Image: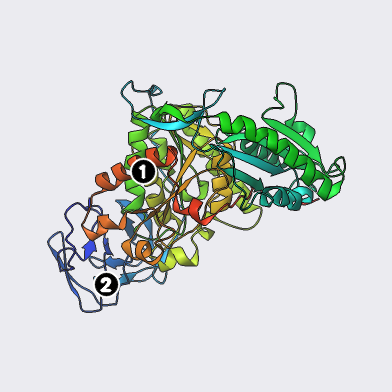
Amino acid sequence: MLVEITKVPNAENSAIHLHPTDNVAIARVPLPAGTELRVDGLPVLTRDAIPAGHKVALWDIAAGETVERYGQAIGRATVPIDAGRHVHTHNLAFEELVLDYEFPTTEIPIPGPRADAPTFLGYAREDGRAGTRNYIAVVAASNCAAHTAELIARSYDGAELPPNVDGVVAFPHGEGCGHAFGPDMDQLRRTLGGVLVHPNVSAALIVGLGCEGNQIGHYLGPGVGANRLVGMTLQGSGGTTGTLAAARREITRFFEQASAEQRVPCPASKIVLGLNCGGSDSFSGITANPALGYCSDLLVEMGGTSVLGETPEIFGAEHLLVKRARNREIAEKLLGCIRRYQEYLARFQSTFDDNPSPGNKEGGLSNILEKSLGAVAKGGTSPLIDVYEYAERVTARGFTFMNTPGYDPVSLTGLAAGGCNLIAFTTGRGSAIGFPTIPVIKIATNSHTFRAMPDNMDINAGAISDGASTVQQIGQQIFDTLLEVASGRRTCAERLGHREFVPWRIGPVM
């Protein structure tokens, strides 16, 4: 797919036909009305102006007929659509599909590490994981301590840090009190706990007010070493200024041990890669996502782990993952995530099709089915080994899935808390997100976004649709970049100071 497209637009290469059964093609470049196309030998004359990334009908489509992209249904025509017409939200209706699941009948073995796997320079941790960074984290137990956590971290702005210390970073948020005890509080604690003991964190402070629902004692149980995690409250440490002074004393001690930690060669099997997309466009499923999927397969082959998130953005494509599940149990776990998410949305009179944003639609994506079919390409072709709840510790090797929202800062927070030490993020419209302690590699789906936001984008997958590279070449570039970033190379998001952190609140405010 897309390996021989030339740079100069002509009748043969101006539209991309992704599957033989598709009755639409994707405009590679803006197509004025009256443009003569030839798609797989079929002559097509555009009757509307077709923006780049948008769909053009290849032949007449009757009202009520299924429209296909990627060889899969993405909706039904609401009116008759003549060949050459623009196909989008004005004439294409979303409908929930009744999918035919092909469940696995055998057990697929979990991959093991390859002896000849490449290495990166990382921080070997006592629990067997590896860090790609070495931070001191200051985590607020609740909104009541958020400002103080930020003050503590900001007090090191401009300071010369000891060797091997990447920084002191805060994790402020608006949660932790007024929560219903039960699943919602459990999820917050799982999230903050994952951040506190993350392999990219040398040591951490958990800071509370003292009387909030999310008590710091939850994180300071038996077996938690004081050399890695310390807790304090504003009410017990003399208020904001007293807590700031006490925290700085603890961080001075943390600096001593962190500066003694050295990067050492670690096998690629120690990489746990979060797969996320945001600000998607129609090119996402053609360029960046398949290339990231190729990288994911390479990593899995080396014994590493990739974690696909965003449950709303596999909806309508989950049958493709079910077919690849390690066994029937894992397939059912994945479908359980879909069902519970549907129930969650129904409580708020919402559906999965509320997910595509105005930017997604402007970029050519008509509905969630079309978006999801492109999004799952980030997971490559490897077997689905396990499925995790939001912020649950990821322990399996291979390709996995985590139940996260499609909302990017919340999804990245869950992936991070689960132990991802790198995140690869594809974007068509130009999302500029990052994370406090994890490098986020930005992959542009089109060359326009790459050129328009050069300080935000690390890799240009738009070279695929330009005809300058293949999916495999960009996938290899992403994999090589993973190893470089894991060894210390800074990403654009890191250089710009992006540190978004947003836990997922699922319950009521009390």
163 with respect to 4 (left or right): right
Instruction: Compare residues 75 and 421 and report the one nearer the observer.
Output: 421
Tell me what residue is drawn at x 26 percent, y 62 percent: 25
- Looking at the rendered structure, the number of numbered marks drawn on it comes to 2
The spot of residue 341 in percent (x, y) is 58, 46
Give the residue type that dot 1 points to.
Answer: Thr
Q: Amino acid at mark 2?
A: Asp
Q: Work out how far the residue at label 1 is from the one at label 2, CA to CA, in angstroms.
A: 45 Å
Q: Is residue 196 above or below residue 453?
A: above
> What residue is disc 1 on?
481
Residue 428: x %, y % from top left: 40, 60
Q: Horizontal and vertical percent for residue 342?
A: 57, 48
Residue contact at pointers 1 and 2, CB within 8 angstroms:
no
281 vs 356, nearest the viewer: 281
* Label 2 crowd bin: few (<14), some (14–19), many (20+), radius 10 Å: some
Residue 82 shows which numbered tag?
2
> Which residue is painted at 15% across and 59% down in the image?
40
Q: Nearer the viewer, mark 1 or mark 2?
A: 1
Q: Quadrant of residue 80?
A: bottom left
**Residue 314 appears in the rendering:** no
Q: Secondary structure at mark 2?
A: loop
| Residue at image point 45% right, 56% down | 368
- Residue 330 placement, left or right of 207: left
Q: Secondary structure at mark 1?
A: helix
Instruction: Please report whichever mark, 1 or 2, sits nearer to the chain's N-terminal start.
Output: 2
